[in-house]
Structures are given as C-alpha cells and as structure tokens.
Image (cartoon, coloured by chain):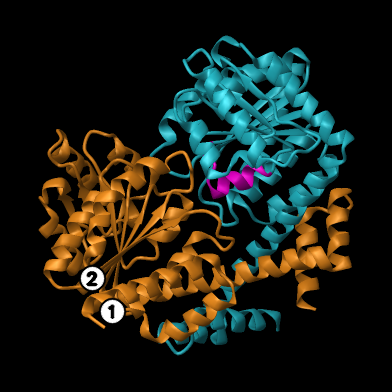
Chain colours: A orange, B cyan
Amino acid sequence: MTVNETTKNEKRAIAKAITLIEEGGPQAISLLQTIYKRSGNSHLIGITGPPGVGKSTLIDALIVEIRKNNLKVGVLAVDPSSPFSGGAILGDRIRMQAHTLDSGVFIRSMANRGFAGGIALAVHDAIRVLEAYGYDIIIIETVGVGQSELAIAKLADTTILALMPGSGDDIQAIKSGIMEIGDIFVINKGDLPGANKAATNILQSLDLVQEKGPWTPPVLISTAQDGNGIKELWQALQEHFNHLKSSNELETRRKQRIKAELAELVAYKIRTSCLDSIEHLDLAKKLVDDVYQRKQDPHTAAQSLIKLLNN
Amino acid sequence: MTVNETTKNEKRAIAKAITLIEEGGPQAISLLQTIYKRSGNSHLIGITGPPGVGKSTLIDALIVEIRKNNLKVGVLAVDPSSPFSGGAILGDRIRMQAHTLDSGVFIRSMANRGFAGGIALAVHDAIRVLEAYGYDIIIIETVGVGQSELAIAKLADTTILALMPGSGDDIQAIKSGIMEIGDIFVINKGDLPGANKAATNILQSLDLVQEKGPWTPPVLISTAQDGNGIKELWQALQEHFNHLKSSNELETRRKQRIKAELAELVAYKIRTSCLDSIEHLDLAKKLVDDVYQRKQDPHTAAQSLIKLLNN
C-alpha cells in the first residue's frame, strides 16, 4: 500500500467513525470505548463569533500555518441550528475544503440538529476519534454564541472569539457578557476602517469583565484573506497552550469538561429510559393521563417518575 | 380599586411569576403547583420563521384582530440565543409594545439563555401562568427553527410558519425538512414580487412532505403592515383549533407534549443531582479522575454514575 492509500484509508475510517457517532447507538459506544485510551493528547482550539467575520478564512489560513510546522490538523465545523442561515456558511467552506487533499488535514461538518443528546456530546466523541488518529491540533468552529455554541466553546482548551470592525459586534459581545469565554480575541478583516477602535473597545471591556489572572487575553488584528496576522495568532495559540500546561489550568479545564459531559450523558440516558417507560409502563402512562387531566402537576409527576425509574 | 388598577396589579403579578419561573427554584415550583389546576384552557399559537419576515408585525396585526373579538391575548417572545442577532428583533418589538396599555394584552420577552433546564421548560410554565389568568389566546414567537426553536414550536397547539417572497427561504424551508411543523403557512410581505410563486412552491412541497390527513395546511399571503390577510389568518387559526378539538388531535398533541416535558424535567433534575454528587461524593469524584486519567471511558463512567445515584 502506498502512503497515499494509507492516508485515504485512514481518512475514510475517521469519517465512518464520526458518522457512527452522529447516528448514536451501541456500535458508537463500543468504538469509543476502544479508542478512548489513545485520546487526550491534542490541543483543542475553539473558534466562534458572528456570521460574516471570516471564521472559515481564518481557519483556512491557520491550517496553512500549522502545516508549515508539520503538525496534523483536524477541523470540526458545527453548522448553525437554523436552516435559514446555513447556505452562506457552507459556501465559505469551499476554500477550506481544498486542504482535504493534504494528508495531514481532516475537515468535517457536523450539523447542529437531530442529536437527541445534543450536539456537544457528539462533538466530544468526534474529537476523540481525531485524537486517537494522532491529530495534533483540533479546531472546533461554531457560529454564534448561543446556548449550544457556548457548550461547544467549552469543549476547547483555547477559545478564539473572532469579531470584525464596524459591525457593532464588539459592542454586542461586550453587552451580552460573552467576553469571558475568549482566551484570544481576533479582529478579522483588519483592513476595514475601525479595526483599531474595535480592538481598543475590547481591551477596555476585558479589564472590566475578566478577572485579572496569570493569562491576559491578547487582542489581535488580522486580515486572514492575505494571511496577515496569522503567524501572530498561531504564536498566541501556542503560548496559551503552554500557559495552560504550566499553570495546571489544562487539568482543571479538562476535568470541568468531564464533569459536564458525565452529567449530560447521564441526563441523556435517563431521558431515553424515561420516554421508554412512558410508552411501556402502566404506572408511567397513568402519570401522563393525570397531568393531562390536571389531577397532578408536571413537577410532582416528574418526581414520581424518578421514583418509578429507580425501582 | 379601579378596573385600571386591577389590571395593573394583575399584569404585575404575571410578570413577577414569569420572573420567578425564569430564575427557577422551589418557589417557582410551588407557584406552579398552585395554579396548575386553572391552566390548560387557552389556544396556544406558535409562530416561527427566519429573521426579517415580519413576525412581530404579523403578531401586532393579529393582536388587533383578536382584541376585536374581545379575547385576552398573551405573547411570549423567545429571543434568539445569539447575542449577535438580537438587536433588530428587539427593535421590531417596539411597535408591539404599544399594546401593553390595553388591559387584555400581555407581552413578555424570554431570553433563550441561562436556563439550566432549557428554555422550553420555562416557556411551558410561563404559558400556564397566562392560562391561569384567563388569557384565551397565547402566542409564542420564536426566531429560526433550530433545535431549541423546534422544541418551542412543539409547545403550541397550532404552529404558523412565516416566510417571505424572494428570500429563498421557501426553498431553504423545503430542503431542511421543517415543513412538517407548519399547520398554517403565511407568506408575509406579500406586496413584494414573488409572493404567489413562493406560495405555489410551498403548496407543491407540502404534497410531498406532509402525510395527507384530515387537515390541509392553508398557505396564506399577507401584508401585515397594512393589515392585509390578517382576518384570513385569524379565521384559519380558529378553524385549525376547531379541527384539533373535533378530531381529538388536541388531546393527542397535548399528551405528547406532557410526555416530552416529563422526560425533560426528569433529565433536568437528574443532571442537577448528578453535578451535585460529582462535587460531594468521593465515589463520583473518583469517576471524574478515572476518566481524566483514561482509566475509564465517559460512557462506562456515566453508567456507574447512574448506579451510584440510584443507591
């Protein structure tokens, strides 16, 4: 088998594994049990921000930079949940897809719908597949910073918040209290007027919202389309990862993530067995009837259902 | 006390109750246990669709129509989860707010973030407060049709899917498979070119995606700004509600909703007690360490955690 064929087979295996994960079920779980020991050795980078700031172009440029260092890089792009904003984003991604010919690059879109357990659980597991295959850097791209996107941002070791000048996004971001999630801020499309102003706004508000710690989030200006500012971004990413490792913050963050994942997995399994008993257990069916007939309120009925499930 | 003062007090009580629900906790639950018997008698109307189709203007016009019939109407507007698309929508709502001087109208925004149990659970309960206060019609407005918006759409008895001509939204909606949720389709901004074409597209695709049942979803064209098509929309809403009642579909839908709510409530309670035991039980803490050290995978650990919680 040539090197090329090995690569092709590997990528096919990864794609198949992620599809399994998306579909869920016992096969996916047994796969994850097998590979879990080999996971946990990558730098997970989250990148989020409003549509139109050029996240895909940024990632495209980052891939070029990372590949110069001969590191393997995987990208998981989590598509927005609304079918009404999906078009443009997929279009942006075409440029990025050119990298898939490179043996050290794997790119995959995961749609933010249809996961009974929530997209975050599936992304957790997809990351592990890439880790097991020796991808050094894994970039998780999300659009927007809603509830589910925030959950995904929390999956990363380092989170980049990307904004652009003149859009008012900096003000929106500051107002909405999402500044805390950024380890690195990037004002992309830095050739547009107002880039320095946006950077200053963010720097000033960071003073207010983030606790002064050993890490001060840098605010970078980039023009990803021309590759400007990308070297600096890559350097900031490495510095942040080194900071996480030397300060023990990496262990803290990863344990925090495991806690949230375990609680989510338990909630998912219980929700499933709950729906199952409602269909099949007479006592559970009666609870639904009681709530419908206003004999019992849902909160009291949920408590009874928990007791029922424990027996 | 004058009638005016009674109304003011009532609205203040409702607002306070919904705030309690948003905050969660035992006080909210005991409130809901008290009012539950008085709930369940309203027509719940969900309205969803992409930003810019004029949902708020549609609701504004619908309120006028509903008030002509001397019915009380409540509106719960669920704000999008992303802080980057909230601005325009709140702006649109200013016009709607003029109705709040009317004693028979209550309007409230609920932000789609910060609910540990998900926004859908809080909306469920907010609806009950309005029902208990005798609101005949409750309109639930959501933006987009992502995972959480779909969950909210399922809270309604009747769901309106609002689209506009020439935006390609009709095509997006058809492709994305969200057509099934619409009981009534409205092409708003019907004075723009392409309204008839959009209506035809939807009618044709409905033939493909929806099972032929006793209810054929009407596709209406409206220009809410001028009040055109609103009388027809109100009539369609009443026809659909009558259909639900006479066909027993209302009971089926409402029981389905109770099932989903109970499962969600149970999952929420279990997630909370799971996070609690991870902080306080040594055996649960050890599970987190084991997963972190790759001695155990998360799926296996979640099973152990469930056993632990049952003891």
Residue B182, x across and y down, in percent: 65, 36
Rendering quarter of residue B234: top right
Q: Crowdedness of circle 1 by 10 Å Cα count: few (<14), some, many (20+)?
A: few
**Disc number placed over residue B282 in the picture, else none:** none
Residue B181, x across and y down, in percent: 65, 40
Give the Cα separation between the discs numbered 1 and 2. Answer: 9 Å
Q: Inspect the image, locate mark 2, and give the three-letter code of the amino acid beneath it.
A: Ser
**Which residue bears the numbered disc 1?**
A6
Sequence-first disc among 1 and 2: 1
In the rendered view, tell whether residue A261 sits above or below residue B295.
above
Q: Is residue B83 visible?
A: no
Element on which disc 2 rests: loop
Left or right: A198, with B307 as reference point: left
**Which residue bears the numbered disc 2?**
A103
Task: Give A15 or B42, whichever is nearer the viewer.
Answer: A15
Q: Chain of mark 1?
A: A
Is residue A213 a member of the stretch shown in magenta? no
**Residue extent of the magenta highlight:** B143-154
Q: Chain of mark 2?
A: A
- At 40% across and 56% down in the image, what residue appears? A78
Q: Crowdedness of circle 2 by 10 Å Cα count: few (<14), some, many (20+)?
A: some
Q: Is residue A188 visible?
A: yes
Task: Give A44 or A30, whichever is nearer the viewer.
Answer: A30
Element on which disc 1 rests: helix
Q: Quadrant of the N terminus of chain A?
A: bottom left
Task: Give B289 or B146, whichever is nearer the viewer.
Answer: B146
Residue furthest front in the image:
A1
